[in-house]
Each structure stands twice: as structure tokens, then as C-alpha cells.
Image (cartoon, helix red, strand yellow):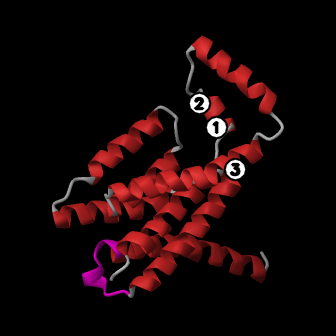
Amino acid sequence: MTQARVGSQFFVRAYAALLPIAAGVLAFALAFPSVLHAPYSLVVVGISALGVWISLVDFRVHRVPNWITYPLMLAGVARAIALADATFLIYWMVLFSLWQVRFMGGGDAKLLMGFFGLFPDFQLAWVTAVSILVTGIPYLVFKYRHQWRSIPRALFLRLITRQLLPSPTEFEKEAVPYAFSFCLACIAYLVLHVAPR
């Protein structure tokens, strides 16, 4: 094995180990700003960089890694316990239900669960909805630009067969990478609503 290959493997292992730790530290810095004393702008830049990385991975492999979503979710649960605030559970139940009916992927649902665990605020839901509309509709138009004539027929067949939601194989085949929209929404929320005054 060449020395360059060994060095490359070391870098990949270190990267895979440090990224979840960084995600957890950033999430805890957002959940407990008075404990970690991290500059807010630095945390927003870190979350933005993490969001870009998550988006790139989702575009490339259509997956959001668990080792990124779990630290966010853990920080949200710790925040809820510390503040005795179980509001996030409402959002988590809705997101879990959407995942179970194949309206969104598991990684997308867990990413949003992490964000709503940190910020159980209806304003984040609105910002997320706007982000999906602003980024999702153009993406879908681009993706299906050559199939416009077949869409009405496909919708009609779904209505007749009463299969409104995709089957598991259709869901895997036609997955849409929405992590970009969700990360953009979280960053916009941080900049617009949580910024210290």
C-alpha cells in the first residue's frame, strides 16, 4: 500500500470521526448559547458549512447520513429536557408520519427533526415551507422538463388505482434531494429569527 493511499485513508477516517463531533458541538452551541459562549456568527457560519456539506452529499448519493442527523436530534432532546419544553414532539410526530407514508425520506425527516428539536418554533415551519417552494418547484420543473405530457396521465392512473403515494420502489427510484431546502430554511431561520439583538 502506498504512503499516499494510507494518508488518504487516515484523512477519510479522521473526517468521518470529526464531522459528527462538529455537528454536535454546533448543535449544542445553538441549544445552550450561555453554556458554550460561542460567538453566534461563528455558529451560524459553522451550521451553514454543515448545511452545504449535507446538501452536497444528498445531491450526490440521495442520503443524509445518520451520523450527522443524530447529534442534531440529541442536542434537541437535551434542550427540551433542560428547558422542560416538549413542543418539539409535535413536530417530530408529524415528520415521522410523513416519513412513514413515504412523503419524505428518512434522512430528510431526521434532519428536520434535528432542526425542530433545536428550534421548536412555528416560524421555522413557515420558513421551511417557503424554502421548499422556492427551491423545490424549480428543481422538479427541471427534473421533469421532458415528461410534462405524461404527468396528467400518471396522476389520473394514481387516482383511479387509489395509489396516491409512491410505492417503496418508486420512492427509491424517484427520490428528490430536499436536504438543500431544509438546510437553507434552517440558515434563514437562524439569520432572521434567532440572531441576538
For badge 3, the amino acid type reads: Tyr
Q: Residue furthest left?
A: 84
Find disc 2 in the rendering and name its residue.
168
Find disc 1 in the rendering and name its residue.
172
Q: Earlier in the sequence, mark 2 or mark 3?
A: 3
Residues packed near mark 1 inside 10 Å, few (<14), some (14 to 19) or many (20 plus): few
Residues packed near mark 3 inside 10 Å, few (<14), some (14 to 19) or many (20 plus): some
Horizontal side of 189 relative to 148 (left or right) equals left
Name the secondary structure under disc 1: helix
Do the numbered discs 1 and 2 sit on residues whose CB atoms are within 8 Å? yes
Tell me where the magenta segment starts and ends, as one range: 30-38
Q: Which residue is more in the foreground, 84 or 10?
A: 84
Observer able to see residue 141: yes
Q: Quadrant of the C terminus?
A: bottom left
Compute the Cα span from label 2 to label 3: 22 Å
For badge 2, the amino acid type reads: Pro
Find disc 3 in the rendering and name its residue.
139
Q: Residue at x 34, y 47 (%)?
A: 92
Q: Position of residue 117 (x, y in %)?
A: 33, 58
